[in-house]
Amino acid sequence: MDTKNNQYGLHWVDQITDQILAWQKSHGVKKLHVDDMKTPSGRVHVGSLVGVVLHDVIAKVLQSKTSQPVTSTYVFNDMDPMDGLPSYLDQAIYQSHMGRPLYKIPAPDLDQSGINFSHSSQQEKAKFAHAGSMAEFYALDFINAFRRLGCSQKIIWSHDLHHSGQMDDFIRTALDKVSQLKKIYATVADYKLPDNWYPFQVVCEKCGLVGNTLVTDWDGEQVSYECQQNKVKWSTGCGHQGKISPFGGHGKLLWKVDWPAHWAALGITIEGAGKDHTTAGGSRDMANEICAQVFAIPQPFDIPYEWILVRGAKMSSSKGIGTSAREFVDLFPASIGRFLFVNKHYNQVIDFDPTTMAIPDLFDEYDLAAKIYWGQVEGDNRLARSYELAQIADTPPPAHYLPRFRDVALWMQYPEINLQDKFADLKGSLLNELELNLLAERQEYALRWLKNYAPREFQFTPSEKLPEEVAQLTTDQRQFLGKLAELITSQTNWQPEQLQQAIYDLAKNSLGSKAGFKAIYLAFLGKTSGPKAAWLLLNQDRLFVQQRLSHFT
């Protein structure tokens, strides 16, 4: 579609990519390399998806606008120490690994990992079971989530960069220029460092910890270090002192130096980060100065972005670990999940509560965006652009009928309604294969929403427990429900229309049809209305219906 001709202005992705191309030209940047990074220390929170999708879509739009190659990578910083113990891991096992590099910590058992594998295939379980480390295990979970959203970055493991020697020159430079680094810490962050401070942590030769080591000297070839017992609160060093080469994976730079060192080693020219990194004197300011004064490289193009705020008690783990990316991408189809991220400007917070009508509203906005893109309705072309960028396939599908999600969710709870027929009537013709598949997909996600998150007033499925609202029943209504139990058990092969008429007659001849049907809905749904009563009752397990009505006999 035409991204230039829009009365509302350019989509933010087109704005930022045009800025990047202009910046590249004005600064003489030779190549475009888009990157993002993450430390895989446990289940990855949904917030990290913002950066992944942002960098992925920027890389792909850049590639569409230029003939030069655009590199897109994602680095897992698995050389970092384990400095926090997730509550879902076996404390007795993993406490001893605190302070070790994440790539050297064993992967957890599937049933003790904090990840729900109950719906996973055997193939997926096998991949996790063969993970070589804790870092790989949780990175794999996150990779699966963002691949679902169409993100295709090349994966890079920090420990591979170190062991291959790719980080060696930049480790040497940082150690040689320690005086410049101290000045940067002082001027940018107002942080005075000790005289014998060095920006490197050794993996202790004796105990294997990296979080507890302190480098005290550098002679140009080896560093002297101590594995201090009380350096940090979360692990205890062994007290060993020694000298070792800092190269070839024997250790890592401290994070504020390590970040720009990765940029230098990989040739990264575009990398944003959450706005918390861009405060005055923060890690981004530090990294920019280190690029200029220590590694002599241009600072990468920055994209300071906001986060996603997920509300709703049901989206928080009982173990206090928050909403994982895996859980979040299961809420909706991949293109709609991607749409959520690309449609919101990167400098605006995404505030999302699945326990409200946020999911149906998201489907509605996606459908509107599709119709604008197809030219079926007029509207903001930035929405249409979001629809285009949200597609997982290379090209968007042809125009087709879109069954409204909230209608699917409501009507699928009415057993008397045939959804295919209902939507065919609304469309004005039979649904084609694409539309039938879309309807089936929306039914799947509607059922998931209804079961786990939908507001109670939108749910018309009988509750397992007797609703509190039965307290509203009058004596006549209770007596009617007792007679209804006898009516239903009088036959074993009721047809819906036949039973509906029998219920109507029973109610009309006693307390009145309106009060009778209201009693049924209160007893089963805790509501005063709902699907046709006969269809509702016959669609439930026969024993369940008998047990529910037995409360009133």
Image: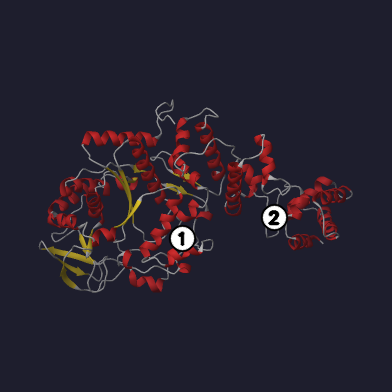
What residue sits 74% from the left and 51% below the top? Answer: 521
In the rendered image, residue 492, in percent from the top left (x then y), is placed at 82, 60
Rendered view: 174 above or below 84 = above
In the rendered image, residue 443, in percent from the top left (x then y), is placed at 61, 48
Rendered view: 190 above or below 85 = above
In the figure, is residue 186 to the left or right of 341? left
Q: Nearer the viewer, residue 237 or 7?
A: 7
- The secondary structure type at the circle numbered 1 is loop
> Which residue bears the numbered disc 1?
320
Q: In the rendered structure, are the residues bearing label 2 and label 1 in contact, judged by CB atoms less than 8 Å apart?
A: no
Counting every numbered tag in the picture gives 2
- Mark 2: give few (<14), some (14-19) or many (20+) Cα within 10 Å: many
Rendered view: 447 above or below 234 = above
Q: Earlier in the sequence, mark 2 or mark 1?
A: 1
> Which residue bears the numbered disc 2?
462
Q: Amino acid at mark 2?
A: Pro
When asked about the image quadrant of residue 222, the answer is: bottom left
